[in-house]
Amino acid sequence: MWMVPCPALTPLVALWLLGLKTQVMETNSISCKSQGASRLPEFYKDGDFVIGGVFSIHYYMHAVEHNYTSLPESLKCTGSMDTRELRFARAMEFAVEQINNRSDLLPDIVLGYQIHDSCAAVPVALKVAFQFANGQDAEITTSTSCANVASVAAIVGESGSTPSIGMSRVLSLFGIPQVSHSATCACLSDKRQYPAFFRTTPSDHFQSAALARLVRHFGWTWIGAVRSDSDYGNNGMASFLRAAQSEGICAEYSVAFYRTNPRSKVERVADVIRGSTSRVIVAFLATGDMRILLEELARRPPPPLQWIGSESWVADPEMLRFGLVAGAVGFGIEQSVIPGLRPFLLDLSPARVALSPLLSEFWEGAFDCKLTQVQSKGDTSGKHSGKMCTGTEDLSAVNIPYTDTSQLRVTNMVYKATYAIAHALHRVVCDSVSNCDKNVIVEPHQVLQHLKKVNFTVNGYPVTFDANGDPVARYELINWQVSEDGTIKFVTVGRYDASKPKGHEFSLNRNITWMNRQTQVPLSVCSDSCPSGTRKAPQKGRPVCCYDCVPCGEGEISNETDSLRCISCPDDFWPNSKKNECLPKPVEFLSWDEFLGIILAAFSIVGAFTVIVVAVVFYRHRSSPIVRANNSELSFLLLFSLTLCFLCSLTFIGRPSEWSCMLRHTAFGITFVLCISCVLGKTLVVLMAFRATLPGSNVMKWFGPPQQRLTVVCFTFVQALICTLWLVLSPPFPIKNMSHYKERIILECNLGSAGAFWAVLGYIGLLAVLCFVLAFLARKLPDNFNEAKFITFSMLIFCAVWITFIPAYVSSPGKFTVAVEIFAILASSFGLIICIFIPKCFIIVFRPDKNTKKHVIGKVPSKAL
């Protein structure tokens, strides 16, 4: 299509179109001439309609220094040949031949092709794109204007993403559709920038997501990343790193290079890989870049690495010669079968090869011979041995990527791309009954519109494009496994299908052999997994995958590995020793079955039994002088109250309940007041008895048995009233005390009203002090058996016990608070029984000779007088 330069066009297009000189030859004729020599296709076939093809058959473009004093040299390819790309080009030829032989697709129409080698270089790809847009004729003269139809209806190619981007920017301006078989950059899905671009290979957007899922599936969180410094590598790796970050994966490093970079740059990248700590490396590299990197790494091999590859190289048979990468895993295009392709590829004779400079170079490289004495066009290295080709060479016996049709992956993408263009062209030139008009002028934009709608199946493979010009993403998970004979082969171990529901896209169906032929999944983490009971604490200044494992705090657990935080246990629960489970807190109270409870209960029962024994002794000797002289009525009442005191301590043992909480404190308060009241009564009797021996004293008539009983009842009634008010207004109740100990629950009785509790104790203390004072005053009264002495000792013990009880009670934790209270009850009760009654029982039982009236009264009358 001949066009006049326009300011709206890109600068590159404008510069190119400035080379188109329009010269008026005559008044009614125009001559259009393109500047510079046209680039001849490597493979060509004329036809009614022609489609273009662009493949990276050579690795490099010959660099030319321009002196701007002469016309620049034509762009030439150099370096070694990628015979796999040659297979792609010939697969397009094969597809066109098949289409021409079909009666249901473009019948009676000959489809032609022009296939170019882009040298994997953007300048060459752009030149070919302009040539497809403008035609090949050096000069065209018409009577009206320059031709406005491109030389091709559509284009298959290019193999790389970067050249495809450059081509698409040019071709989109002219509406010429481009269907790539191998350009996977996700950026090409942007229809605002690349409206005429289609592809039969999946976008890297899907591959990046699949690779991130793969890495996460095997638990690798610490990886290295290396990429091609091109649109393919940079965009693909950026997409992968975004997906990896969302999966919790960190990259230790991310380095880039391009095969045309100085060797020092490649060495730096190799050194980064050798010095890394990650054992998994994700390589988003073009095949040529990967080859250069592996050659550099082979000079000084790094520690064993688990390679994760992009589809560009992981399914390339030519890379299998690098044992350094054995065990590699990556996603590749699905394998396919193209019937008849292998015979077509092998159908080359020396005579036919000699007609094509590209095939001649291929032939000489494959068999290490020369077709003629003159070195072939592409052989600039002088690497051939110098022997002449005999013409008997057998291409089927050569093991090279060109002849290897066992792993047809990208080749099938070329095949499908060619058929897609044919189907779109069929819709343009043929009607519904397949009547085709070969004379119709086909505009490329017509083919573009119908390409968006194609939906067919070829060799069992569906072909369709979505709104972005992309196919449905389907991959095979390929594993480089070492066979028994030591060779490396591709083994399909899983699949990825983006059309399946979320979470079910990825599946494994075979075991994977890892680096060094390991069957166990290699480990690659910055920090080991944090076990349950710990949490991850990020290390300052390092990626989130590098962390320390910090034990959970007090009262917290984590019940999964690599937990980001610990969770607090409920109030009634506490972590186990591993801090990975919340267990119910042990409930602590003074129980019957623990040693302390058993000991205290035993002492309580022994005390009560002792009191009963004393009561029996006193009852049997109730008429003896020593019993009668010590107020037997109050003595029996005192023994009864002491029995209750010993037994009330049992109410403090066992699980607290509402009734036990109310009973234990009130029973304790009332029985002790009853006990102290009896002792106080006995003390008063002693004092009054000796006062009564004085001349003229009649005090005993005011302190006879009725008055003694009334005194005990009155003192006890006051305590009973305090306890009743306590129970009515704010009674004790059981509570779970979780504040004193965090790891266990103390089941105890809340006092309800602390004031009432201390009032009960205070009243007991008041009576005890009063009793002690009176007994102390009566201790020296003349009597062989003065009971006031023993009461003094008992009250001294009683007061000492309860004075020390107060700080011990306040400071004792948990069940020991109850134990202290029981101990105080038992100690004071034993003090009373031992000091007051045991000496009398000793005399009654063991010294009956002293249990006489004379001995008990002694010289009291004379002393009183």
Image: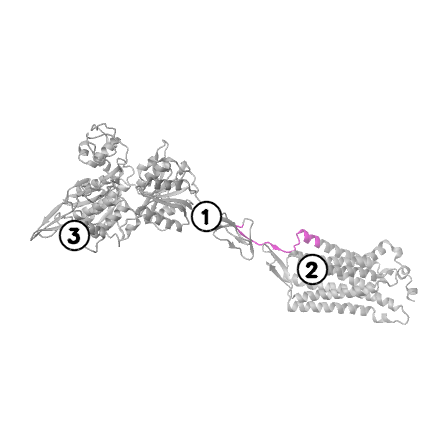
| Crowding near the residue tagged with mark 3, few <14, some 14–19, many ≥20 C-alpha atoms within 10 Å | some
Residue 192 quadrant: bottom left
Mark closer to the chain start, 3 or 2: 3
What is the C-alpha distance between the residues marked 3 and 2?
108 Å
**In the image, what residue occupies the spot 89% across and 69% down?**
694
What percent of the width, then of the height, locates residue 558?
50, 51
Q: Is residue 484 magenta?
A: no
Magenta-drawn segment = 579-600
Residue 620 visible in the current orientation = yes
Q: What amino acid is found at the position of numbered circle 2 in the picture? A: Pro
Q: What amino acid is found at the position of numbered circle 3 in the picture? A: Met
Give above or below for 552 relative to 369: below
How many numbered marks, from 0 up? 3
Q: Which residue is mark 3?
A: 3
Q: Which residue is mark 1?
A: 546
Frontmost of labels 2 and 1 is 1
What is the C-alpha distance between the residues marked 2 and 1?
53 Å
What percent of the width, then of the height, locates residue 471?
28, 48
| Crowding near the residue tagged with mark 2, few <14, some 14–19, many ≥20 C-alpha atoms within 10 Å | few
Q: What amino acid is found at the position of numbered circle 1 in the picture? A: Cys
Q: Secondary structure at mark 1?
A: loop
What percent of the width, then of the height, locates residue 242?
37, 50
Give above or below for 100 relative to 828: above
Towards the viewer: 610 or 1 = 1
Towards the viewer: 580 or 66 = 66
Mark closer to the chain start, 3 or 1: 3
